[in-house]
Each structure stands twice: as C-alpha cells, then as structure tokens.
Image: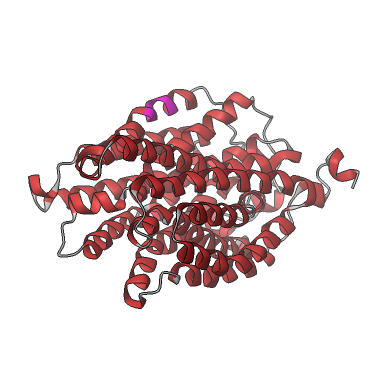
Amino acid sequence: MSVTSPRLSSRNVAAAIAGNALEFYDFVTYAFFAVQIGRVFFPAYSEYGSLMLSLGTFGAGFAMRPIGGILIGRYADRVGRKPAMILSLALMGAAVLAVAVIPSYAAIGVAAPVLVVIARMAQGFALGGQVGSTTAFLMEAAPLSQRGVYTAWQGGSQYCASLAGGIVGILLSSLLDADQLQAYGWRIAFALGALTLPFGLFLIRNVPETLNRSADTSVDAAAGGDWALCVVHRRVILLGLVTLASATIFTYLTNYMTTFAETVLHLGNAVAFGATLVVGVSGLGGVMFGGWLSDRVGRWPVMVWPRVVYLVFVWPLYAWIVEMHGAAALYAATAVLVFLGTMSFGPFYAALTESLPTRIRGSAVGTTYAISIAIFGGSAQLIVTWLIHISGNPLAPAWYLIASGICGVISTAMMAETAPVRVGLAPRPASAAAE
C-alpha cells in the first residue's frame, strides 16, 4: 500500500471536489431533461420512440469513457493529477456549451442529432479521465485515518451535481410551462453548467500536485511496466469492475426517477424534478456517512451489509411508489433506497484506490470505472425503459436493480479489507477505540 502525500489544505481538497461536481452536473443534466431533449432533437412517431432515441444518445456519452479513462488516466499517472483534472474540465466545458447552442432538428435537420451525439461523446471522454485523476488526488491528499471520508467525496460530489440539477430543474419547471421548458428551458440548465466551469478551472489552478512516483513500494516497482502491474493487481481490478457495474446501474436508475415520474407515474414536471432533489440529498448523506464510518470500523462491513439491507427493500419500496402514485411515496421511498444504496460507495472508492499502486492508480481506477459505466451505466435507462414498454410492468426497474445488486454484493464481499485502522497503518479513532 502506498504512502500518502503530505496533507493538503481543506481549500485545496474542496477545489478538486467542486471541479468534479461541476463536471458531473454537466454530464447528468442530460438525463434530467431526456424527455425534452428527445422532442427537440429526435422527433419520432411516438413519445416512446423519441425518448428511446434521446436515452440512446445519453448512452453514447458513455462509449468514450473508457478511452478518456485510459488516455487522461495515463496522463494523470505520468504528468500529474492536477493537469489531468484541468484538461478534463476544459473539455467538458466546451462540450456542454455545444449542447446548449445546437439548433433543433426542425431548424437544421439530421445535423442536429449528429452534433448532439458528438458533443455527448466529448463529454464522456472528459468525464472518463476526470474520475481516476480526482479519486487518486483525494486519496493521496488524505491523512491515513481519513481516507474513507476523503475519497467518499468522489461519490459525494456526484450527488452534489444531482442536487444542483434537481434545484435547477425545479426552478425552471416552476417558472416555465411545458412548452417553454421544451423550447428553451433545458438549454438554460446546460448554459448554467457551461458558465460555472471557468469557476472550477479557477479553483483547481492553485491546487498542489499530489502525484509522488517514489511512493510505490519495492514490490510494485519491481513488477515491470504498467501493464504488468495491472496483471499483478488483476483480482482487485476485476472485482472493482463488477462492483462498479452494479453501482452504476443503481446510480443511473435512481437518476432515472425523474423520467420514471414523468413517463410512468405521469406526475408533473415540478414533482418529477423533486425526485432528483431527493436523490441528491439522500445520496450525499449516504455516501459521506459510509465513508466516515469506514474509517472507524473498516471498509468491508460498510461496503457489504448496507447493500444487503438495500436489496431486501428494493421491491417493496418500488411497489409502494407505483401503488400510491403520488409525490410523498415517491420521495420517501427514493430517499430510503438511495441512502442505503450509497453507503457502500465511499468505502468502495477508498478500498479500490488503496489497493492500487501510485504508478497505475489514476488510469486503473479511471478505466475500471469507465468500462463498467460505459457498458452498464449507459444502457441502464435504455434497458428499463424498454422493459417497462414490452412488459407493461412499472416494477421492471426493481427487478433489474435486484439482479445487479446481488452481483455487486458478491463482488464487494470478495474484496480485502484495506482500511488503515484495520491493517495496522493508523491508530483507531478515539470514538471507535472506546466501543
């Protein structure tokens, strides 16, 4: 296990977290406005056809994530975490601005959806490189006894982005009617993201570098090239791949609650975006609590047991949402599911990153994350929309979540304990020592 870099200031860490949150806001905003974007860029013979084309384009953004994870991840491992984060943020800014200004299908014809697909692929490339470099930075910036809570901010910043998207969606749907939201309201949400990205670049430019190539252990240094190191650490990489596949299906199906509320429950736009707000608040609380707890009791129990409880509650809570068909049940059930499901995220990010040497940390974490997201995250919303359509069963998302969740529990249960408090690298926190 690698030695950490000297501790950075809270302001430095907050800057990296803010940059990551801004980048994720720009990527996931598309999911929140999938219905409106589908009507603008992908006219079809039915609402279902338009939505499927829109969600397919959302998935196209994931196709470039592995390439971004490999190329920008290697850049982060060779040159530095900071320049990799700046590069990713700049690429995302250009791509999201493009989506905001591309004319509609009615204005320029087939060129419109083609340009949207290209912009989404650029976004995916940028985000694929952002995850590995930011996660490596957060772990390397953390004191030994706080790695869990520091790296949990990788997931926490994503839920901050979801929270911001929910707030913007609620404000826009409250101020604009359905026609205005479709005509230009969704563009405002993208434009806000493009306008705030320069602020993220400003914050990151003063962040110190955490990459310390001399921190690799002698075993890692003797392993040969980067590919040889990946082979040595193949078990944890494969387990991470399966765990992330399960986690990304969960993440994008909970983000899908906005579309689910609109298209299946037929609730209003404001209520639907309220679900996104609930996802953001509950997800942020769950992932940060899980990271904090894992610094005290270890990574393994927090990665595994909350996910087991979550699996027990998935079907009953989805059934309750569908039966009650109202905002209260939607919000309450979503809050419980998201909190339970995200508790394992913080300790998992820490465990995966702690298990990898400095020399391949950025590229291995970023590529593992990107591959799982590209295959399973990009297809999740498309698959459940199709399942609901062909089966006529609004509970189809619950069965998909259960199947993927079982795979995730098995893979996390097979991962080794890496928390410094459990492997003897750091003293037990006072609160834990007293128990």
Residues drawn in magenta: 196-200
User: Where residue 38 appears, x then y in whole percent?
Assistant: 23, 54
Decide which of 84, 414 is in the foreground and name it.
414
Structure colour scheme = secondary structure
Q: Is residue 406 left or right of residue 146?
A: left
User: Where residue 426 appears, x then y in whole percent?
Assistant: 81, 42
Residue at (47, 33) in percent of width and height: 19
Q: How many marks?
A: 0
User: Where residue 92 appears, x then y in whole percent?
Assistant: 35, 39
Q: Is residue 169 above or below residue 240?
A: above
Residue at (44, 50) in percent of width and height: 69
| Residue 157 seen | yes
Q: Main secondary structure of the magenta part?
A: helix
Q: Is residue 199 magenta?
A: yes
Figure quadrant of residue 179: top left
Decide which of 196, 411 is in the foreground and name it.
196
Q: Is residue 133 magenta?
A: no
Residue at (26, 56) in percent of width and height: 54
Decide which of 139, 344 is in the foreground and name it.
344
For this orientation, the residue located farthest to the bottom is 391
Q: Is residue 328 left or right of residue 425?
A: left
| Residue 91 seen | no
